[in-house]
Structures are given as structure tokens and as C-alpha cells.
Image: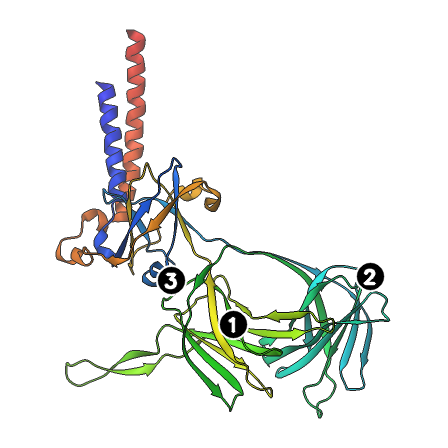
């Protein structure tokens, strides 16, 4: 008799937990079928598609996996990351001088041959573009050109670009020359030079199509402007690579974005009719960077045509690339291509049972599953491949407005409190029942 009571309690608790995991599907706009490949692995891995990013919220917290019984399937959302190691050197400044052409010069002594591939050259001023030359030597007598002409920029106090990429080298001495912008300018002042060795292990990328929209030349600002369409919003784009026709150049570049060209603004009116007017959506700055291509004295060609985007920054559907030409002729950007690092969903699935992914809820709270505690490194788990089908409208969307909302949906917090109290009470009851069963067995 006691055993049957315990079994009934366990069934009741399981039913209560299941009701909490049930999902009100009418709150999600879109859905996509999930298919799972054959295999024996306990876990499955699903890669998000561009359409999911476009339909989901920016934080991706409205994504849900649902099984055939309309209950949530716990999952872990993970995104591969680039691994960057940067070692900073502290060389000794052994010489500061000014050349005949008024270039500021500084020589760095690393005390021994060490591998390095970039510098940060900090110069005085808040609005400039100055050419930089870098040479290397092992005896501080004969120097060899590493970079013939790079540039450092300052648009304002907080918008500076001071990094100079170097061919990987192990010269003991580096000589840095910073030229004035024009003949009438005084010799620039080099405040500090920092040297680094940077190593990167890049996460796997997927290509993203960039559709060319327009190109224009702004003579007033001496800039070339290119606009592209990614076709989707909120894509996790990690980098953009430009195909430039010119052979030798060094340019400052800004990247801006927006999701639409115009938006509707409601107008006040004396009657009940709604009136709107179209206003232009302003561009939002994403990053500033440089691109270049040059040939060193030994005939080696060097170039940097990739714009790297911050991993946590927002990426818009429409991108505007502005290339600042200053007094040089405009460069010609033939095309642009993008790559993104996509999120993966890792979830447990028995057999090959299909599931459905729901997305597009503005009110959904971020899910919290115990699976996240069990999988410390979900991207390293052996998993079967799961694939998403086409994204379609959810036929149940909005139907909750036509039927009363369940009491459990209205009072989730209260329900959880009641559940905790019941678990404590029932737990005590189970313990007493176990003692009673054990006592009966001892007596028998």
C-alpha cells in the first residue's frame, strides 16, 4: 500500500514538471522543422541559418526547440571564438632624432633577436594622417626596409588608428620614421612606440553574400562610398574582405550600418485618421580600420584588405564602406565579401525523433536549462548533425488571444513556489513512507 502511494507521488511530480516545460506555441511567429541524422550519439548539433538570425531577437533568447508532444527540448547555445595571444615587448629607446626631411625618428633595441609582427606608433595631435617607415637591423648600422609607407591616423581624440602591421621579423633593432603631413608642417613628435607579437587561431567561418547596391564619390570629403546588402539582419559577421583593383595604396576606412533606408514616423492629427511620414534612418558607425597593399624593397608584396568586426557588436543588414582618399586618387573596390561565425545549438535527442524550432517572440524570457551545467564545453561534445528546414509562418501564432490563458502561464512564479513547497512536503511524506515500509519488512 505504501509503495503504491510513493509511485503515485512520483507520477504527480513528473506531471507537474512536464507542465512547466510545455510551451505556449501561439507566442512565436515562425517555425522550422529539425531533422536529425542517423547515429548513436546522445547529443545533436544544429547550426543556425541566416533566416533564424533575421527572425530572432538580437539576443537569440526567443529560440525554442519543441518535441512532438509540444514540450521544450533543453539545449545549449554556443558560438566558436577566435583565440588571440598577444605578447608585448618593452624595447629600449636608444636614439631619437630628426632627419633632413623633418621626419621624426626613433630606434628601438630589443636587446636580442625576437619575433614581432606589429607596432603601435603614438604621435602628438588629434587630426592627422602621417606616413610611417619601418626598418630593421641586427647591428644598428645596416638597416633593411620592412614597411616603406604605412600610415597612422587621428580623426579626433578618441578615434585614432596607430597600428602598423609588419612582416614577421626577428631583427634586434627597429628604426621608425614618421613624416610630416605637408611641407609646411613642423616635424611630428613620437610619444611612444609599442611592439607586439600577435598569434591568432581562427574559428571556422561561413561565407555571406554581399550584394552591391551603389557606389559614389564624395569630392568634398575626398571619399569613395560603397553600399552593400547582406539580405538578412543581425548576422554574426566576423570580417569583410575588399577586392581592390589598385596596386599600391594605404587608406583609412569606416564601416557603418543600418537595417532600413527609411522608417515611418506617426504624425499628430486632429481627426482619428493615422498619418505617417517617411524619414531617413541614419547610419550607425561599426568600426574604423585601414586597408593597404604595397611591395617592399626585396620584392615581397604585402596587403591587408580584411576589416575585422567586434565579436559582440551588432551587424546591420545594409553596410556602408567609406574609403578616405585624402589627397590621393580614389581606389577602386571591385567587390566585397563577408564571413560569419555561426552559433550552434547542442541538444539531447533519443533516436532520430524530429523536432521543431520556434523563433520570433518579443516577450519570451531567456530559457534556463540544467543541460548547460552538464555540458561545460558543448562544442567539443560528440554529436550527430541536425539540420533546419525552411522557415515558415507558425499557424498557431496569435491564437492565444482568442482563448483564455492558462492559470499556470499567468502565475509561473507562484506555481514554482507551490511546487517547491509541495516537493518539501511530499519529500517528508516519502521519507516517512520508506521508514514505514522498512518497519513492516523487519516485522515480517
- Cβ–Cβ below 8 Å for labels 2 and 3? no
| Residue sitting farthest toward the front | 299
Q: Which mark is residue 242?
A: 1
Left or right, 244 with respect to 387, comes to right
| Residue sitting farthest toward the bottom | 184
Task: Look at 71% across and 91% down and name the residue there.
Answer: 183
Q: Is residue 141 among the parts visible in the rendering?
A: yes
Indicate the position of residue 29 as horizontal and vertical percent values. Answer: 25, 59
* Eye-nearest disc, 2 or 1: 1
Where is mark 3, residue-wise?
Answer: 58
> Which one is earlier in the sequence, the residue at label 2 or at label 3?
3
Indicate the position of residue 185 as horizontal and vertical percent values. Answer: 70, 90
| Residue sitting farthest toward the left | 402
Local packing at callout 2 (Cα closer than 10 Å; few below 14, some 14-19, many 20+) is few
Left or right, 248 with respect to 403, comes to right
- Where disc 2 sits, the SS reads loop
Local packing at callout 1 (Cα closer than 10 Å; few below 14, some 14-19, many 20+) is some
Q: Relative to 351, say whether 278 is above or below.
A: below
* Eye-nearest disc, 3 or 1: 1
Local packing at callout 3 (Cα closer than 10 Å; few below 14, some 14-19, many 20+) is some
Q: Is residue 156 among the parts visible in the rendering?
A: no
Indicate the position of residue 97 as horizontal and vertical percent values. Answer: 81, 79
Amino acid at each position: 500500500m505504501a509503495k503504491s502511494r510513493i509511485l503515485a507521488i512520483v507520477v504527480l511530480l513528473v506531471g507537474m514538471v512536464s507542465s512547466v516545460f510545455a510551451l505556449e506555441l501561439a507566442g512565436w511567429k515562425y517555425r522550422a522543422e529539425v531533422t536529425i541524422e542517423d547515429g548513436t550519439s546522445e547529443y545533436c548539433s544544429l547550426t543556425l541559418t541566416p533566416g533564424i538570425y533575421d527572425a530572432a531577437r538580437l539576443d537569440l533568447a526567443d529560440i525554442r526547440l519543441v518535441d512532438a508532444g509540444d514540450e521544450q527540448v533543453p539545449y545549449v547555445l554556443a558560438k566558436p571564438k577566435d583565440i588571440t595571444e598577444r605578447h608585448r615587448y618593452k624595447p629600449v629607446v636608444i636614439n631619437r632624432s630628426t632627419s633632413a626631411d623633418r621626419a621624426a625618428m626613433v630606434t628601438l633595441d630589443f636587446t636580442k633577436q625576437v619575433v614581432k609582427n606589429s607596432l603601435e606608433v603614438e604621435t602628438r595631435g588629434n587630426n592627422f594622417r602621417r606616413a610611417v617607415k619601418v626598418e630593421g637591423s641586427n647591428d644598428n648600422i645596416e638597416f633593411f626596409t620592412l614597411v616603406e609607407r604605412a600610415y597612422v591616423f587621428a580623426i579626433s581624440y578618441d578615434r585614432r588608428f596607430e597600428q602598423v602591421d609588419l612582416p614577421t621579423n626577428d631583427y634586434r633593432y627597429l628604426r621608425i620614421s614618421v613624416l610630416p603631413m605637408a611641407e609646411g608642417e613642423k616635424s611630428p613628435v613620437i610619444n611612444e612606440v609599442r611592439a607586439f607579437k600577435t598569434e591568432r587561431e581562427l574559428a571556422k567561418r561561413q561565407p555571406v553574400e554581399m550584394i552591391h547596391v551603389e557606389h559614389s564619390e564624395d569630392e568634398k570629403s575626398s571619399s569613395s562610398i560603397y553600399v552593400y546588402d547582406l539580405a538578412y539582419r543581425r548576422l554574426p559577421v566576423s570580417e569583410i574582405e575588399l577586392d581592390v583593383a589598385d596596386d599600391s595604396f594605404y587608406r583609412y576606412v569606416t564601416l557603418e550600418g543600418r537595417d532600413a533606408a527609411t522608417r515611418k514616423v506617426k504624425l499628430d492629427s486632429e481627426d482619428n485618421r493615422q498619418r505617417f511620414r517617411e524619414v531617413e534612418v541614419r547610419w550607425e558607425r561599426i568600426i574604423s580600420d585601414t586597408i593597404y597593399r604595397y611591395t617592399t624593397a626585396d620584392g615581397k608584396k604585402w596587403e591587408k584588405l580584411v576589416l575585422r568586426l567586434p565579436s559582440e557588436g551588432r551587424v546591420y543588414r545594409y553596410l556602408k564602406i567609406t574609403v578616405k582618399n585624402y589627397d590621393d586618387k580614389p581606389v577602386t573596390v571591385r567587390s566585397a565579401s563577408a564571413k560569419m561565425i555561426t552559433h550552434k545549438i547542442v541538444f539531447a535527442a533519443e533516436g532520430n525523433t524530429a523536432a521543431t524550432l520556434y523563433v520570433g517572440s518579443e516577450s519570451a524570457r531567456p530559457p534556463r536549462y540544467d543541460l548547460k551545467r552538464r555540458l561545460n564545453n558543448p562544442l567539443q561534445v560528440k554529436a550527430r548533425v541536425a539540420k533546419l528546414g525552411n522557415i515558415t509562418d507558425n499557424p498557431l501564432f496569435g491564437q492565444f488571444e482568442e482563448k483564455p490563458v492558462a492559470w499556470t502561464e499567468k502565475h509561473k512564479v507562484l506555481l514554482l513556489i507551490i511546487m517547491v513547497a509541495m516537493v518539501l512536503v511530499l519529500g517528508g511524506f516519502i521519507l516517512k513512507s520508506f521508514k514505514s515500509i522498512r518497519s513492516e519488512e523487519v516485522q515480517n
